[in-house]
C-alpha cells in the first residue's frame, strides 16, 4: 500500500519567515501579513489544495545576537515585526471546513492556567481543528523583555514544559466530566466539575478549568524541538514532530531516534508523526523553475539571514568571513540546528547558499520533478509528511473556498 504523505504549510505572522529580504520581491504579498484577507486567502488556497493544516511559527523576541543588536533583522524583515499567531485562528477557521490550524505557544513565558482557557476557546471556535506547537523558546531577548536576566537553561526549559503539560492535561481532561454541562434547569452540575489541586515545582493551580469540554479537550500536539531532551519530551507528549536536517541521512537518524524513544515510553512508535521541513520552487518547466529559484536567491538579505542563524545557534556570526567554518559554541539556544550543522562542517557561505531559501530539501523543478523529489525524500528519511515552507507568497488567482 502506498504511503499517504501528510502536508502542512509553514508560515509566520511576519513579512518574511525563513528568507529575509524576499518581502521586496515584486510578486511578494508578504507586506500584507497585517491584513486579515492575506490569511483568509491563504487558508482558502490551502483548503482547495487539500493541505492537512497550516502551521504558524512564532517567536517572542527579536533576533539581536548578530552584531549585538536587532538592526540586521529589522532591515531584512527577519521575523520582525511579528504579530500574534493566535489572533488568526478564528478567521482561518471561519473560511475553511477541514484545514487544521497549528499555532505556536511557549511554555516558558505564559502561565498554563490562562493558556489552557485560550486553547479551549480556539478548539470550540474551530470545531476541534486547532493544534498547539509546543515550544520552550530560545531567544535571550524574549527572556529579558519578560523580566528575566536571561533565558532558563535548555534542559530546565523542558522540565518546566513537562510540568506545564501536566497542568494543562489536568485542566483539559480532568476538571470537567463529559456530562457536566446540562443546560436545562441549571447550566453546569458543580458535582461534576473538579478542582485540579496542582501544587508543583513551577506551577500552583488549585481550581477548576474555566471552559467546558471542547471537541478535542486536549488540542493536537506538535513539538518542534529535536535536541536530545526535546526528543524525550516528544516521545511522551507529541502527536507530531517538526524536524529539519540538511541531508536525508541526518533526518533519518532523527526519525528513527524519535520512534525508538516513543516505543521506550510505551507508545506505538508510529503514533508520533514526523513532518520534515521542505521548500518547493516550481513552475511549468524545469528551466522556468530554475530561473525562478535564481531570481528568488537574488533577493535574499544576507545580513538578515545571518541574524536568524545567529539567534538559532546562540552566537554572533558577524565576525565570521564567508569561508570561515562555523564552529558551534555550546549554549542554550536551538540545539537541534547546531547539531545538524555539525562542528565546522559548514561555512557562512554554505549557510547562505544552501539554506537561504528555507529548510532543506529545496526542491526545484516542474510539478512532476518536485513530486518525484518529495517521494524520494520521504522514502529516504522515513518521515510521515512535509511542513512546506514558502519563499514568496503570491496573490491567489481565486478566493473560492472550493
Image (cartoon, rainbow, N blue to C red):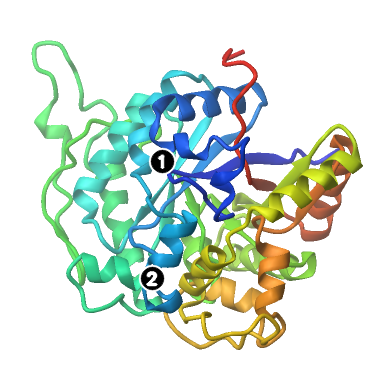
Q: Which mark is residue 219?
A: 1
Residue 162 versus residue 117 in the image, above or below: below
User: Image quarter for residue 359?
Assistant: bottom right
Tell which circle, 1 or 2, labels the residue nearer the N-terminal end.
2
In front: label 1 or label 2: 2
Question: Closest to the observer: 204 or 184?
Answer: 204
Q: Quadrant of the C terminus?
A: top right
Helix, strand or loop at mark 1: loop
Circle 2 SS class: loop
Is residue 127 something that shows in the picture? Answer: no
* Residue 164 sits above or below residue 169 on the image: below
Q: Quick one: quadrant of the N terminus?
A: top right
**Residue 326 seen in the current view:** yes
Q: Nearer the viewer, residue 30 or 50?
A: 30
Q: Up-down: is 144 above or below 357?
A: below
Is residue 106 rendered to the left or right of residue 66?
left
Distance between mark 1 and mark 2 Cα atoms: 33 Å
Residue in the picture at 58% in, 60% down? 301
Read off the residue under disc 2. Answer: 64
The percent coordinates of residue 204 (x first, y second) are 14, 61
Q: Position of residue 305 (x, y in %)?
A: 56, 64
Residue 319 pos. (x, y %): 53, 86
| Identity of the residue drawn at 62% across and 57% down | 300
Amino acid at each position: 500500500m502506498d504511503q499517504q504523505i501528510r502536508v502542512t504549510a509553514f508560515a509566520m505572522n511576519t513579512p518574511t519567515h525563513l528568507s529575509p529580504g524576499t518581502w521586496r520581491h515584486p510578486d511578494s504579498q508578504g507586506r500584507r501579513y497585517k491584513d486579515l484577507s492575506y490569511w483568509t486567502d491563504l487558508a482558502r488556497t490551502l483548503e482547495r489544495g487539500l493541505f492537512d493544516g497550516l502551521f504558524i511559527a512564532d517567536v517572542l523576541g527579536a533576533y539581536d545576537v548578530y552584531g549585538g543588536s536587532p538592526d540586521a533583522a529589522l532591515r531584512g524583515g527577519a521575523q520582525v515585526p511579528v504579530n500574534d499567531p493566535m489572533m488568526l485562528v478564528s478567521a482561518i477557521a471561519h473560511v475553511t471546513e477541514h484545514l487544521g490550524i497549528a499555532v505556536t505557544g511557549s511554555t516558558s513565558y505564559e502561565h498554563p492556567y490562562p493558556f489552557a482557557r485560550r486553547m479551549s476557546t480556539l478548539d470550540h471556535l474551530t470545531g476541534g481543528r486547532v493544534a498547539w506547537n509546543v515550544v520552550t523558546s530560545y531567544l535571550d531577548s524574549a527572556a529579558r523583555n519578560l523580566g528575566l536576566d536571561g533565558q532558563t537553561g535548555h534542559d530546565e526549559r523542558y522540565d518546566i514544559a513537562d510540568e506545564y503539560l501536566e497542568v494543562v492535561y489536568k485542566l483539559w481532561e480532568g476538571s470537567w466530566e463529559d456530562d457536566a454541562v446540562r443546560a436545562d434547569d441549571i447550566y453546569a452540575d458543580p458535582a461534576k466539575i473538579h478542582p485540579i489541586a496542582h501544587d508543583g515545582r513551577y506551577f500552583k493551580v488549585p481550581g477548576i478549568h474555566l471552559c467546558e469540554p471542547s471537541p478535542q479537550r486536549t488540542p493536537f500536539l506538535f513539538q518542534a524541538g529535536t535536541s536530545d531532551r526535546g526528543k524525550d519530551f516528544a516521545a511522551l507528549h507529541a502527536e507530531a514532530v517538526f524536524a529539519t536536517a540538511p541531508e536525508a541521512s541526518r533526518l533519518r537518524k532523527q526519525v528513527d531516534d524519535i520512534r525508538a524513544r516513543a516505543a521506550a515510553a510505551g507508545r506505538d512508535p508510529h503514533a508520533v508523526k514526523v513532518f520534515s521541513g521542505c521548500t518547493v520552487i516550481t513552475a511549468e518547466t524545469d528551466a522556468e523553475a530554475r530561473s525562478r529559484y535564481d531570481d528568488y536567491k537574488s533577493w535574499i538579505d544576507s545580513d538578515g539571514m545571518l541574524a536568524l542563524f545567529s539567534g538559532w545557534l546562540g552566537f554572533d556570526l558577524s565576525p565570521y568571513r564567508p569561508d570561515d567554518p562555523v564552529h558551534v559554541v555550546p549554549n542554550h539556544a536551538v540545539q537541534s540546528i547546531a547539531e545538524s550543522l555539525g562542528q565546522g562542517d559548514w561555512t557562512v557561505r554554505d549557510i547562505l547558499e544552501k539554506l537561504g531559501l528555507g529548510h532543506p530539501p529545496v526542491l526545484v523543478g516542474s510539478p512532476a520533478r518536485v513530486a518525484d523529489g518529495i517521494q524520494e525524500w520521504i522514502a529516504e528519511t522515513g518521515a510521515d509528511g512535509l511542513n512546506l515552507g514558502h519563499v514568496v507568497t503570491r496573490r491567489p488567482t481565486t478566493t473560492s473556498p472550493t
